[in-house]
Image (cartoon, coloured by chain):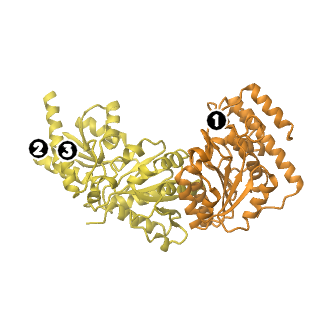
Chain colours: A yellow, B orange
Protein backbone atom coordinates (compact mmCIF):
# COMPACT_ATOMS: atom_id res chain seq x y z
CA UNK A 1 0.00 0.00 0.00
CA UNK A 2 1.19 3.55 -0.70
CA UNK A 3 1.54 6.26 1.91
CA UNK A 4 -1.44 8.34 3.07
CA UNK A 5 -2.57 11.00 0.61
CA UNK A 6 -1.17 13.70 2.90
CA UNK A 7 2.30 12.13 2.86
CA UNK A 8 2.26 11.46 -0.89
CA UNK A 9 1.25 15.05 -1.52
CA UNK A 10 4.07 16.35 0.71
CA UNK A 11 6.66 14.07 -0.87
CA UNK A 12 5.68 15.19 -4.33
CA UNK A 13 5.74 18.86 -3.31
CA UNK A 14 9.31 18.48 -2.04
CA UNK A 15 10.22 17.02 -5.41
CA UNK A 16 8.49 19.77 -7.40
CA UNK A 17 10.22 22.45 -5.30
CA UNK A 18 13.49 21.57 -7.01
CA UNK A 19 12.28 23.26 -10.14
CA UNK A 20 9.38 25.47 -9.04
CA UNK A 21 9.54 28.56 -6.88
CA UNK A 22 7.11 28.78 -4.00
CA UNK A 23 7.09 29.35 -0.25
CA UNK A 24 5.89 26.84 2.33
CA UNK A 25 4.46 27.80 5.72
CA UNK A 26 3.45 25.52 8.54
CA UNK A 27 1.98 25.87 12.01
CA UNK A 28 4.06 23.16 13.67
CA UNK A 29 2.16 20.02 12.76
CA UNK A 30 3.29 16.84 11.10
CA UNK A 31 0.46 17.26 8.66
CA UNK A 32 2.06 16.14 5.43
CA UNK A 33 5.64 15.02 5.95
CA UNK A 34 7.35 18.18 4.81
CA UNK A 35 9.11 19.13 8.02
CA UNK A 36 12.45 18.92 6.18
CA UNK A 37 11.44 21.38 3.48
CA UNK A 38 13.37 24.25 5.06
CA UNK A 39 16.56 22.23 5.29
CA UNK A 40 16.27 21.23 1.66
CA UNK A 41 15.28 24.71 0.47
CA UNK A 42 16.67 27.31 2.88
CA UNK A 43 14.75 30.57 3.08
CA UNK A 44 11.62 29.06 1.54
CA UNK A 45 9.99 27.57 4.61
CA UNK A 46 8.73 29.12 7.82
CA UNK A 47 7.18 27.38 10.79
CA UNK A 48 5.09 30.06 12.49
CA UNK A 49 4.50 28.02 15.63
CA UNK A 50 1.09 26.93 16.84
CA UNK A 51 -0.74 29.96 15.48
CA UNK A 52 -3.05 29.13 12.57
CA UNK A 53 -4.59 32.56 12.17
CA UNK A 54 -1.13 34.04 11.86
CA UNK A 55 -0.22 31.23 9.45
CA UNK A 56 -2.92 32.29 7.01
CA UNK A 57 -2.34 36.04 7.53
CA UNK A 58 1.36 35.61 6.73
CA UNK A 59 0.49 33.48 3.70
CA UNK A 60 -1.81 36.25 2.46
CA UNK A 61 0.96 38.82 2.93
CA UNK A 62 3.46 36.77 0.92
CA UNK A 63 0.88 36.10 -1.79
CA UNK A 64 -0.01 39.80 -1.95
CA UNK A 65 3.55 40.37 -3.18
CA UNK A 66 2.83 38.13 -6.16
CA UNK A 67 4.28 34.85 -4.90
CA UNK A 68 2.83 31.36 -4.69
CA UNK A 69 2.57 30.11 -1.14
CA UNK A 70 1.48 26.83 0.41
CA UNK A 71 0.31 26.77 4.02
CA UNK A 72 -0.18 23.52 5.85
CA UNK A 73 -2.00 22.48 8.98
CA UNK A 74 -4.83 20.17 9.96
CA UNK A 75 -8.10 20.73 8.14
CA UNK A 76 -10.03 21.43 11.36
CA UNK A 77 -7.73 24.34 12.17
CA UNK A 78 -7.48 25.76 8.66
CA UNK A 79 -11.24 25.67 8.22
CA UNK A 80 -12.29 26.86 11.67
CA UNK A 81 -9.48 28.39 13.73
CA UNK A 82 -8.36 30.39 10.71
CA UNK A 83 -11.74 30.48 8.98
CA UNK A 84 -11.98 34.25 8.76
CA UNK A 85 -8.39 34.68 7.61
CA UNK A 86 -9.07 32.25 4.77
CA UNK A 87 -12.29 34.00 3.83
CA UNK A 88 -11.37 37.67 4.19
CA UNK A 89 -7.64 37.73 3.53
CA UNK A 90 -7.21 34.93 0.99
CA UNK A 91 -10.53 34.43 -0.81
CA UNK A 92 -11.80 38.01 -0.83
CA UNK A 93 -8.59 39.46 -2.32
CA UNK A 94 -8.32 36.27 -4.44
CA UNK A 95 -4.71 35.54 -3.48
CA UNK A 96 -2.54 32.69 -4.63
CA UNK A 97 -2.55 30.70 -1.40
CA UNK A 98 -2.87 26.91 -1.42
CA UNK A 99 -3.93 25.29 1.84
CA UNK A 100 -2.65 21.77 2.43
CA UNK A 101 -5.12 20.42 4.96
CA UNK A 102 -4.80 16.94 6.33
CA UNK A 103 -6.91 14.84 8.67
CA UNK A 104 -10.23 15.02 6.87
CA UNK A 105 -13.18 13.12 8.26
CA UNK A 106 -13.70 10.10 10.50
CA UNK A 107 -10.69 8.38 8.98
CA UNK A 108 -8.63 10.30 11.56
CA UNK A 109 -9.80 7.58 13.95
CA UNK A 110 -8.25 7.43 17.43
CA UNK A 111 -7.62 11.19 17.79
CA UNK A 112 -11.36 11.68 18.00
CA UNK A 113 -13.80 14.48 17.23
CA UNK A 114 -11.60 17.51 17.99
CA UNK A 115 -9.16 16.60 15.25
CA UNK A 116 -11.60 15.28 12.65
CA UNK A 117 -12.48 17.80 9.99
CA UNK A 118 -16.09 16.90 9.29
CA UNK A 119 -17.38 20.33 8.23
CA UNK A 120 -14.42 21.76 6.32
CA UNK A 121 -15.78 21.23 2.82
CA UNK A 122 -19.07 22.95 3.70
CA UNK A 123 -17.22 25.91 5.15
CA UNK A 124 -14.76 26.30 2.31
CA UNK A 125 -17.39 25.72 -0.36
CA UNK A 126 -19.29 28.80 0.79
CA UNK A 127 -16.35 31.15 0.09
CA UNK A 128 -16.30 32.89 -3.30
CA UNK A 129 -13.06 32.33 -5.27
CA UNK A 130 -12.24 29.13 -3.38
CA UNK A 131 -11.43 25.92 -5.25
CA UNK A 132 -11.58 22.64 -3.32
CA UNK A 133 -9.76 19.47 -4.29
CA UNK A 134 -9.78 16.11 -2.54
CA UNK A 135 -7.66 13.32 -4.01
CA UNK A 136 -8.74 9.74 -3.42
CA UNK A 137 -5.48 7.78 -3.44
CA UNK A 138 -1.70 8.13 -3.53
CA UNK A 139 -1.54 8.50 -7.31
CA UNK A 140 -4.13 11.27 -7.41
CA UNK A 141 -2.54 12.95 -4.37
CA UNK A 142 0.80 13.19 -6.16
CA UNK A 143 -0.89 14.46 -9.28
CA UNK A 144 -2.85 16.96 -7.17
CA UNK A 145 0.44 18.37 -5.87
CA UNK A 146 1.56 19.05 -9.43
CA UNK A 147 -1.81 20.59 -10.30
CA UNK A 148 -1.72 22.74 -7.14
CA UNK A 149 1.65 24.25 -8.02
CA UNK A 150 0.32 25.25 -11.44
CA UNK A 151 -2.97 26.57 -10.06
CA UNK A 152 -3.54 30.30 -9.48
CA UNK A 153 -5.86 31.48 -6.72
CA UNK A 154 -7.20 30.26 -3.38
CA UNK A 155 -7.02 26.48 -3.20
CA UNK A 156 -8.14 24.11 -0.45
CA UNK A 157 -6.50 20.69 -0.64
CA UNK A 158 -8.17 18.10 1.56
CA UNK A 159 -6.01 15.14 2.50
CA UNK A 160 -6.39 12.08 4.67
CA UNK A 161 -4.43 10.85 7.65
CA UNK A 162 -4.21 7.12 6.86
CA UNK A 163 -3.17 5.21 3.74
CA UNK A 164 -5.77 3.86 1.32
CA UNK A 165 -5.50 1.34 -1.52
CA UNK A 166 -4.38 2.71 -4.86
CA UNK A 167 -7.18 3.28 -7.31
CA UNK A 168 -5.39 4.85 -10.23
CA UNK A 169 -2.52 3.88 -12.47
CA UNK A 170 0.27 6.43 -12.34
CA UNK A 171 1.04 5.96 -16.05
CA UNK A 172 -2.40 7.01 -17.26
CA UNK A 173 -3.70 9.31 -14.52
CA UNK A 174 -3.89 13.07 -14.83
CA UNK A 175 -5.39 15.48 -12.33
CA UNK A 176 -7.39 18.16 -14.03
CA UNK A 177 -8.89 20.63 -11.57
CA UNK A 178 -12.62 20.89 -12.18
CA UNK A 179 -13.02 17.47 -13.80
CA UNK A 180 -14.74 14.42 -12.34
CA UNK A 181 -13.76 10.94 -13.48
CA UNK A 182 -16.15 8.15 -14.36
CA UNK A 183 -14.25 5.21 -12.89
CA UNK A 184 -16.63 2.44 -13.71
CA UNK A 185 -19.30 2.58 -16.33
CA UNK A 186 -20.93 -0.78 -16.77
CA UNK A 187 -24.57 -0.01 -16.44
CA UNK A 188 -27.37 2.45 -15.97
CA UNK A 189 -29.07 1.34 -12.76
CA UNK A 190 -27.48 3.76 -10.34
CA UNK A 191 -24.60 6.24 -10.04
CA UNK A 192 -22.37 6.39 -7.01
CA UNK A 193 -20.66 9.78 -6.78
CA UNK A 194 -17.83 9.78 -4.25
CA UNK A 195 -14.84 11.78 -3.12
CA UNK A 196 -11.67 11.09 -1.17
CA UNK A 197 -11.47 7.93 0.88
CA UNK A 198 -15.03 6.99 -0.09
CA UNK A 199 -14.09 6.44 -3.74
CA UNK A 200 -12.46 3.12 -2.90
CA UNK A 201 -15.55 2.11 -0.94
CA UNK A 202 -17.79 3.14 -3.85
CA UNK A 203 -15.85 0.85 -6.17
CA UNK A 204 -16.17 -2.02 -3.73
CA UNK A 205 -19.87 -1.33 -3.41
CA UNK A 206 -20.25 -1.38 -7.19
CA UNK A 207 -18.62 -4.83 -7.28
CA UNK A 208 -21.07 -6.11 -4.69
CA UNK A 209 -24.00 -4.53 -6.50
CA UNK A 210 -22.92 -6.30 -9.67
CA UNK A 211 -23.34 -9.65 -7.93
CA UNK A 212 -26.81 -8.54 -6.90
CA UNK A 213 -27.64 -7.73 -10.49
CA UNK A 214 -27.47 -3.96 -10.06
CA UNK A 215 -25.28 -2.11 -12.54
CA UNK A 216 -23.62 0.91 -11.06
CA UNK A 217 -21.57 3.77 -12.43
CA UNK A 218 -18.89 5.16 -10.11
CA UNK A 219 -17.80 8.77 -10.41
CA UNK A 220 -14.82 10.18 -8.52
CA UNK A 221 -15.16 13.90 -7.77
CA UNK A 222 -11.68 15.11 -6.86
CA UNK A 223 -12.72 18.72 -7.36
CA UNK A 224 -15.70 19.51 -5.15
CA UNK A 225 -15.72 23.16 -6.14
CA UNK A 226 -16.20 23.99 -8.92
CA UNK A 227 -18.24 20.81 -9.37
CA UNK A 228 -18.03 19.11 -12.75
CA UNK A 229 -21.72 19.64 -13.41
CA UNK A 230 -21.74 18.09 -16.86
CA UNK A 231 -20.40 14.76 -15.68
CA UNK A 232 -22.71 14.69 -12.66
CA UNK A 233 -25.83 15.63 -14.62
CA UNK A 234 -25.07 13.21 -17.44
CA UNK A 235 -24.56 10.30 -15.02
CA UNK A 236 -27.77 11.19 -13.20
CA UNK A 237 -29.68 11.49 -16.45
CA UNK A 238 -28.76 8.01 -17.68
CA UNK A 239 -29.14 6.22 -14.33
CA UNK A 240 -31.98 8.18 -12.72
CA UNK A 241 -30.62 7.42 -9.26
CA UNK A 242 -27.63 8.84 -7.40
CA UNK A 243 -25.86 7.88 -4.19
CA UNK A 244 -23.23 10.30 -2.94
CA UNK A 245 -20.48 9.24 -0.54
CA UNK A 246 -18.08 11.40 1.42
CA UNK A 247 -16.21 11.24 4.72
CA UNK A 248 -17.73 14.53 5.83
CA UNK A 249 -21.06 15.85 7.07
CA UNK A 250 -23.91 15.48 4.60
CA UNK A 251 -24.72 19.15 5.21
CA UNK A 252 -22.90 21.27 2.69
CA UNK A 253 -20.37 18.83 1.30
CA UNK A 254 -20.29 16.73 -1.86
CA UNK A 255 -23.80 15.34 -1.34
CA UNK A 256 -25.21 18.83 -0.99
CA UNK A 257 -23.27 20.10 -4.00
CA UNK A 258 -24.59 17.26 -6.14
CA UNK A 259 -28.15 17.69 -4.83
CA UNK A 260 -28.05 21.42 -5.58
CA UNK A 261 -27.06 20.82 -9.18
CA UNK A 262 -29.41 17.91 -9.76
CA UNK A 263 -32.30 19.68 -8.04
CA UNK A 264 -32.06 22.43 -10.64
CA UNK A 265 -30.92 20.54 -13.72
CA UNK A 266 -31.91 16.89 -13.46
CA UNK A 267 -33.95 15.90 -10.40
CA UNK A 268 -33.45 12.22 -9.62
CA UNK A 269 -33.79 10.06 -6.53
CA UNK A 270 -30.84 10.47 -4.21
CA UNK A 271 -29.25 9.12 -1.06
CA UNK A 272 -26.40 10.88 0.70
CA UNK A 273 -23.84 8.75 2.52
CA UNK A 274 -21.86 10.78 5.04
CA UNK A 275 -21.90 11.95 8.63
CA UNK A 276 -25.46 12.73 9.61
CA UNK A 277 -25.44 15.67 11.99
CA UNK A 278 -23.07 14.10 14.49
CA UNK A 279 -19.57 14.50 15.84
CA UNK A 280 -16.96 11.81 15.43
CA UNK A 281 -15.32 9.94 18.27
CA UNK A 282 -12.21 7.85 18.92
CA UNK A 283 -12.03 4.45 17.33
CA UNK A 284 -10.80 2.51 14.33
CA UNK A 285 -12.00 4.24 11.15
CA UNK A 286 -13.86 1.19 9.86
CA UNK A 287 -15.83 0.92 13.10
CA UNK A 288 -16.69 4.61 12.85
CA UNK A 289 -17.79 4.25 9.23
CA UNK A 290 -20.02 1.39 10.28
CA UNK A 291 -21.55 3.37 13.13
CA UNK A 292 -22.26 6.36 10.92
CA UNK A 293 -23.75 4.33 8.07
CA UNK A 294 -20.81 4.91 5.76
CA UNK A 295 -19.50 1.39 5.17
CA UNK A 296 -19.42 -0.41 1.82
CA UNK A 297 -22.54 -2.29 2.86
CA UNK A 298 -24.32 0.97 3.63
CA UNK A 299 -23.53 2.23 0.12
CA UNK A 300 -24.80 -1.05 -1.32
CA UNK A 301 -28.00 -0.83 0.72
CA UNK A 302 -28.60 2.78 -0.33
CA UNK A 303 -28.15 1.87 -3.98
CA UNK A 304 -30.46 -1.16 -3.69
CA UNK A 305 -33.02 0.95 -1.95
CA UNK A 306 -32.92 3.59 -4.67
CA UNK A 307 -33.14 1.17 -7.55
CA UNK A 308 -36.07 -0.50 -5.80
CA UNK A 309 -37.87 2.82 -5.50
CA UNK A 310 -37.11 3.56 -9.11
CA UNK A 311 -38.68 0.33 -10.35
CA UNK A 312 -41.72 0.78 -8.08
CA UNK A 313 -42.49 4.09 -9.75
CA UNK A 314 -42.02 2.84 -13.30
CA UNK B 1 17.28 54.60 4.01
CA UNK B 2 15.13 57.64 4.73
CA UNK B 3 16.39 61.03 3.59
CA UNK B 4 17.05 63.90 6.03
CA UNK B 5 14.26 66.37 6.61
CA UNK B 6 14.23 70.16 6.78
CA UNK B 7 11.95 72.75 8.38
CA UNK B 8 10.33 73.16 4.96
CA UNK B 9 9.56 69.46 4.87
CA UNK B 10 7.91 69.70 8.27
CA UNK B 11 5.72 72.60 7.16
CA UNK B 12 4.85 70.84 3.91
CA UNK B 13 3.81 67.67 5.74
CA UNK B 14 1.80 69.55 8.35
CA UNK B 15 -0.12 71.22 5.53
CA UNK B 16 -0.60 67.86 3.81
CA UNK B 17 -1.94 66.35 7.02
CA UNK B 18 -4.37 69.21 7.26
CA UNK B 19 -5.52 68.71 3.66
CA UNK B 20 -6.00 65.02 4.40
CA UNK B 21 -8.11 65.91 7.44
CA UNK B 22 -10.29 68.17 5.28
CA UNK B 23 -10.70 65.36 2.75
CA UNK B 24 -11.65 62.98 5.55
CA UNK B 25 -14.39 65.30 6.80
CA UNK B 26 -15.74 65.99 3.31
CA UNK B 27 -15.81 62.36 2.27
CA UNK B 28 -17.39 61.01 5.45
CA UNK B 29 -19.97 63.79 5.37
CA UNK B 30 -20.78 62.95 1.73
CA UNK B 31 -20.98 59.23 2.51
CA UNK B 32 -23.12 59.94 5.57
CA UNK B 33 -21.14 57.17 7.29
CA UNK B 34 -17.58 56.33 8.19
CA UNK B 35 -15.04 56.67 10.94
CA UNK B 36 -13.72 60.19 11.46
CA UNK B 37 -12.18 59.83 14.94
CA UNK B 38 -9.49 57.29 14.14
CA UNK B 39 -8.91 58.77 10.68
CA UNK B 40 -8.07 62.14 12.21
CA UNK B 41 -5.82 60.68 14.90
CA UNK B 42 -3.77 58.90 12.22
CA UNK B 43 -3.62 61.78 9.73
CA UNK B 44 -0.19 63.16 10.66
CA UNK B 45 1.49 59.75 10.59
CA UNK B 46 -0.22 58.78 7.33
CA UNK B 47 0.81 62.09 5.73
CA UNK B 48 4.42 61.50 6.81
CA UNK B 49 4.39 57.97 5.37
CA UNK B 50 2.83 58.79 2.02
CA UNK B 51 4.56 62.14 1.41
CA UNK B 52 8.00 61.57 2.86
CA UNK B 53 8.88 58.22 4.38
CA UNK B 54 7.73 55.59 1.92
CA UNK B 55 9.46 54.75 -1.32
CA UNK B 56 6.41 54.63 -3.59
CA UNK B 57 5.38 55.61 -7.08
CA UNK B 58 1.74 56.60 -7.71
CA UNK B 59 2.15 55.84 -11.42
CA UNK B 60 3.08 52.23 -10.55
CA UNK B 61 0.87 51.15 -7.65
CA UNK B 62 2.02 47.52 -7.92
CA UNK B 63 5.72 48.34 -8.37
CA UNK B 64 7.57 45.38 -6.83
CA UNK B 65 10.22 47.43 -5.04
CA UNK B 66 7.75 49.76 -3.32
CA UNK B 67 7.44 50.08 0.42
CA UNK B 68 4.19 48.55 1.68
CA UNK B 69 1.55 50.02 3.94
CA UNK B 70 -1.08 47.92 5.69
CA UNK B 71 -3.86 49.77 7.44
CA UNK B 72 -4.76 47.11 9.95
CA UNK B 73 -7.33 49.46 11.51
CA UNK B 74 -9.12 49.33 8.18
CA UNK B 75 -12.24 51.20 9.29
CA UNK B 76 -10.18 54.41 9.22
CA UNK B 77 -9.59 54.01 5.48
CA UNK B 78 -10.77 57.57 4.74
CA UNK B 79 -7.37 58.77 5.94
CA UNK B 80 -5.59 56.36 3.59
CA UNK B 81 -7.90 57.13 0.66
CA UNK B 82 -7.32 60.84 1.18
CA UNK B 83 -3.55 60.36 1.28
CA UNK B 84 -3.63 58.22 -1.88
CA UNK B 85 -5.73 60.79 -3.73
CA UNK B 86 -3.57 63.69 -2.55
CA UNK B 87 -0.51 61.70 -3.64
CA UNK B 88 -1.99 61.19 -7.10
CA UNK B 89 -3.01 57.52 -7.13
CA UNK B 90 -6.46 58.57 -8.31
CA UNK B 91 -8.47 61.76 -8.76
CA UNK B 92 -9.50 63.72 -5.68
CA UNK B 93 -13.07 63.67 -7.03
CA UNK B 94 -13.20 59.92 -6.34
CA UNK B 95 -13.20 60.68 -2.61
CA UNK B 96 -16.83 61.81 -2.86
CA UNK B 97 -17.79 58.25 -3.87
CA UNK B 98 -16.68 56.70 -0.57
CA UNK B 99 -18.91 53.77 0.45
CA UNK B 100 -21.21 54.25 -2.53
CA UNK B 101 -22.33 51.52 -4.92
CA UNK B 102 -19.72 50.92 -7.61
CA UNK B 103 -17.06 53.02 -5.91
CA UNK B 104 -13.37 52.14 -5.92
CA UNK B 105 -13.46 53.27 -2.28
CA UNK B 106 -15.10 50.52 -0.26
CA UNK B 107 -16.22 50.95 3.34
CA UNK B 108 -13.09 49.03 4.27
CA UNK B 109 -9.91 48.75 2.15
CA UNK B 110 -9.95 46.45 -0.88
CA UNK B 111 -6.59 45.91 -2.58
CA UNK B 112 -8.22 44.95 -5.85
CA UNK B 113 -10.51 47.97 -6.12
CA UNK B 114 -8.33 50.86 -4.96
CA UNK B 115 -5.02 51.75 -6.64
CA UNK B 116 -2.33 52.03 -3.99
CA UNK B 117 -4.00 49.86 -1.36
CA UNK B 118 -1.48 47.10 -0.70
CA UNK B 119 -3.74 44.82 1.31
CA UNK B 120 -7.39 44.28 1.97
CA UNK B 121 -8.22 44.93 5.62
CA UNK B 122 -11.02 45.82 7.96
CA UNK B 123 -11.47 42.85 10.20
CA UNK B 124 -9.32 43.92 13.11
CA UNK B 125 -6.15 42.25 14.32
CA UNK B 126 -5.12 40.80 10.97
CA UNK B 127 -2.84 43.42 9.43
CA UNK B 128 0.34 42.69 11.32
CA UNK B 129 0.36 39.05 10.19
CA UNK B 130 -0.01 40.23 6.62
CA UNK B 131 2.86 42.65 7.20
CA UNK B 132 4.99 39.78 8.51
CA UNK B 133 4.25 37.91 5.27
CA UNK B 134 5.22 40.90 3.13
CA UNK B 135 8.44 41.34 5.10
CA UNK B 136 9.27 37.63 4.76
CA UNK B 137 8.63 37.85 1.03
CA UNK B 138 11.16 40.70 0.84
CA UNK B 139 13.76 38.59 2.66
CA UNK B 140 13.08 35.62 0.40
CA UNK B 141 13.41 37.65 -2.79
CA UNK B 142 16.25 39.90 -1.54
CA UNK B 143 14.18 43.05 -1.86
CA UNK B 144 14.95 46.18 0.11
CA UNK B 145 11.45 47.45 0.65
CA UNK B 146 10.05 48.15 4.09
CA UNK B 147 6.65 47.24 5.42
CA UNK B 148 4.66 49.65 7.58
CA UNK B 149 1.62 48.41 9.47
CA UNK B 150 -0.66 50.81 11.28
CA UNK B 151 -2.62 49.33 14.16
CA UNK B 152 -5.28 50.77 16.39
CA UNK B 153 -4.98 50.54 20.14
CA UNK B 154 -8.41 48.95 20.49
CA UNK B 155 -7.59 46.33 17.89
CA UNK B 156 -4.55 45.33 19.93
CA UNK B 157 -7.05 43.46 22.11
CA UNK B 158 -7.19 40.89 19.30
CA UNK B 159 -4.98 37.90 20.13
CA UNK B 160 -3.73 37.52 16.59
CA UNK B 161 -1.83 40.81 16.86
CA UNK B 162 0.40 39.12 19.39
CA UNK B 163 0.82 35.96 17.32
CA UNK B 164 2.18 38.21 14.60
CA UNK B 165 4.29 40.26 17.01
CA UNK B 166 5.88 37.06 18.32
CA UNK B 167 6.61 35.81 14.80
CA UNK B 168 8.05 39.11 13.52
CA UNK B 169 10.58 39.23 16.34
CA UNK B 170 11.35 35.52 16.03
CA UNK B 171 12.11 35.96 12.33
CA UNK B 172 14.17 39.10 13.05
CA UNK B 173 12.24 41.24 10.59
CA UNK B 174 14.25 44.46 10.44
CA UNK B 175 12.16 45.54 7.44
CA UNK B 176 8.92 45.70 9.41
CA UNK B 177 7.63 48.72 11.36
CA UNK B 178 4.41 48.69 13.37
CA UNK B 179 2.83 52.00 14.27
CA UNK B 180 0.20 51.97 16.97
CA UNK B 181 -2.25 54.86 16.77
CA UNK B 182 -2.65 55.08 20.53
CA UNK B 183 -5.59 57.47 20.76
CA UNK B 184 -6.95 55.76 23.85
CA UNK B 185 -10.54 55.41 22.66
CA UNK B 186 -12.51 52.62 21.08
CA UNK B 187 -16.17 52.43 20.01
CA UNK B 188 -17.69 52.22 23.48
CA UNK B 189 -15.26 54.29 25.52
CA UNK B 190 -11.73 54.45 26.85
CA UNK B 191 -9.55 51.52 25.88
CA UNK B 192 -8.17 51.17 29.37
CA UNK B 193 -11.69 50.99 30.83
CA UNK B 194 -12.93 48.43 28.32
CA UNK B 195 -9.90 46.10 28.23
CA UNK B 196 -6.72 47.49 29.63
CA UNK B 197 -3.73 47.60 27.29
CA UNK B 198 -1.37 49.36 29.63
CA UNK B 199 1.55 49.09 29.78
CA UNK B 200 1.42 48.89 25.98
CA UNK B 201 5.05 49.78 25.16
CA UNK B 202 6.20 47.16 27.67
CA UNK B 203 4.13 44.55 25.89
CA UNK B 204 5.90 45.26 22.60
CA UNK B 205 9.27 45.26 24.35
CA UNK B 206 8.43 41.94 25.99
CA UNK B 207 7.72 40.56 22.52
CA UNK B 208 11.30 41.59 21.55
CA UNK B 209 10.44 44.61 19.44
CA UNK B 210 12.57 47.76 19.49
CA UNK B 211 10.01 50.17 20.81
CA UNK B 212 9.67 53.96 20.70
CA UNK B 213 7.04 56.30 22.07
CA UNK B 214 6.27 59.52 20.26
CA UNK B 215 3.74 62.32 20.04
CA UNK B 216 1.83 61.18 16.97
CA UNK B 217 0.86 64.74 16.08
CA UNK B 218 4.37 66.23 16.19
CA UNK B 219 5.70 65.95 12.64
CA UNK B 220 9.29 66.35 13.73
CA UNK B 221 8.95 63.47 16.18
CA UNK B 222 7.14 61.35 13.61
CA UNK B 223 9.85 61.79 11.00
CA UNK B 224 12.56 61.36 13.60
CA UNK B 225 11.04 58.08 14.68
CA UNK B 226 10.78 56.71 11.14
CA UNK B 227 14.36 57.80 10.50
CA UNK B 228 15.54 56.01 13.62
CA UNK B 229 13.91 52.75 12.53
CA UNK B 230 16.65 52.37 9.90
CA UNK B 231 19.27 52.07 12.62
CA UNK B 232 17.37 50.01 15.18
CA UNK B 233 17.30 46.26 15.59
CA UNK B 234 14.07 45.17 13.96
CA UNK B 235 11.21 44.79 14.11
CA UNK B 236 10.37 48.26 15.40
CA UNK B 237 7.18 49.39 17.11
CA UNK B 238 6.32 53.07 17.25
CA UNK B 239 3.71 53.75 19.90
CA UNK B 240 2.24 57.05 18.76
CA UNK B 241 0.29 58.92 21.40
CA UNK B 242 -2.55 60.58 19.55
CA UNK B 243 -5.89 62.26 20.08
CA UNK B 244 -8.98 60.71 18.55
CA UNK B 245 -10.66 63.31 16.35
CA UNK B 246 -7.47 65.43 16.33
CA UNK B 247 -7.81 68.86 14.73
CA UNK B 248 -11.52 69.34 15.21
CA UNK B 249 -12.29 70.61 18.67
CA UNK B 250 -15.77 69.13 18.97
CA UNK B 251 -14.52 65.69 17.93
CA UNK B 252 -11.35 65.49 19.98
CA UNK B 253 -11.39 62.77 22.62
CA UNK B 254 -15.10 62.12 22.04
CA UNK B 255 -15.75 58.46 21.46
CA UNK B 256 -19.12 59.12 19.79
CA UNK B 257 -17.09 60.34 16.78
CA UNK B 258 -15.57 56.90 16.38
CA UNK B 259 -18.01 55.92 13.68
CA UNK B 260 -20.39 58.82 13.07
CA UNK B 261 -20.57 61.12 10.06
CA UNK B 262 -20.74 64.87 10.58
CA UNK B 263 -23.83 66.53 9.08
CA UNK B 264 -23.39 69.46 6.67
CA UNK B 265 -23.31 72.08 9.37
CA UNK B 266 -20.85 70.14 11.50
CA UNK B 267 -18.65 69.50 8.47
CA UNK B 268 -18.62 73.22 7.62
CA UNK B 269 -17.59 74.09 11.12
CA UNK B 270 -14.90 71.37 11.08
CA UNK B 271 -13.56 72.55 7.74
CA UNK B 272 -13.51 76.17 8.93
CA UNK B 273 -11.46 75.13 11.94
CA UNK B 274 -9.04 73.11 9.78
CA UNK B 275 -8.68 75.98 7.29
CA UNK B 276 -7.25 78.18 10.02
CA UNK B 277 -4.43 75.67 10.44
CA UNK B 278 -3.12 75.77 6.88
CA UNK B 279 -3.01 73.58 3.82
CA UNK B 280 -4.80 74.27 0.58
Query: According to the image, label 1 marks what residue?
Result: B259
Q: Is residue B236 left or right of residue A14?
A: right
Q: Quadrant of the N terminus of chain B?
A: bottom right
Instruction: Quote the CA–CA distance across marks 1 and 2.
Output: 69 Å
Dot 3: few (<14), some (14–19), or many (≥20) neighbours within 10 Å?
Answer: many
Q: Nearer the viewer, residue A186 or B172?
A: B172
Q: Closer to the observer: label 1 or label 2? A: 1
Q: Regarding mark 3 in the picture, which secondary structure is present there?
A: strand
- Mark 1 chain: B
Q: Regarding mark 2 in the picture, which secondary structure is present there?
A: loop
What residue appears at the point 73 percent right and 39 percent down from the top-left corner? B252
Q: Closer to the observer: label 1 or label 3? A: 1
Query: According to the image, label 3 marks what residue?
Result: A216
Instruction: Quote the CA–CA distance across marks 3 and 2.
Output: 10 Å
Which residue lies most toward the left here?
A212
Dot 2: few (<14), some (14–19), or many (≥20) neighbours within 10 Å?
Answer: few
- Give the image location of residue B174, x and y in percent: 66, 66
The reply to whether callout 3 and callout 2 are in contact (CB within 8 Å) is no
Number of numbered labels in the structure image: 3
Q: Is residue A234 left or right of residue A306?
A: right
Amino acid sequence: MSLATRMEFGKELIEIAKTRDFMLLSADTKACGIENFGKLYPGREYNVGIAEQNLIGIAAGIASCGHKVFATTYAVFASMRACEQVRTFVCYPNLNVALICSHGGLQVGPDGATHMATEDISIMRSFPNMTIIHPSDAVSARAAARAAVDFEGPLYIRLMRDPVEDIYDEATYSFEIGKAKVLRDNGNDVTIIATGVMVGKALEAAEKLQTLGIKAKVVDVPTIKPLDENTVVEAARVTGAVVTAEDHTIYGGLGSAVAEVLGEKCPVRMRRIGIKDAFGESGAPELLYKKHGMSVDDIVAAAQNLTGEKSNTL
Amino acid sequence: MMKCFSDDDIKFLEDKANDIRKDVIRMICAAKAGHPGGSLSAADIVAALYFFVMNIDPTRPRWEERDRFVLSKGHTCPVMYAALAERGYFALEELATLRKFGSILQGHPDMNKTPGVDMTSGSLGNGLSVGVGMALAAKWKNKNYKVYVMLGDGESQEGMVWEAAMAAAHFGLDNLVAVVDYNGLQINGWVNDIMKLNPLPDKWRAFNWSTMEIDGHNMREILGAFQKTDKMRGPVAIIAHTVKGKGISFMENMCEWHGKAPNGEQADSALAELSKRGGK
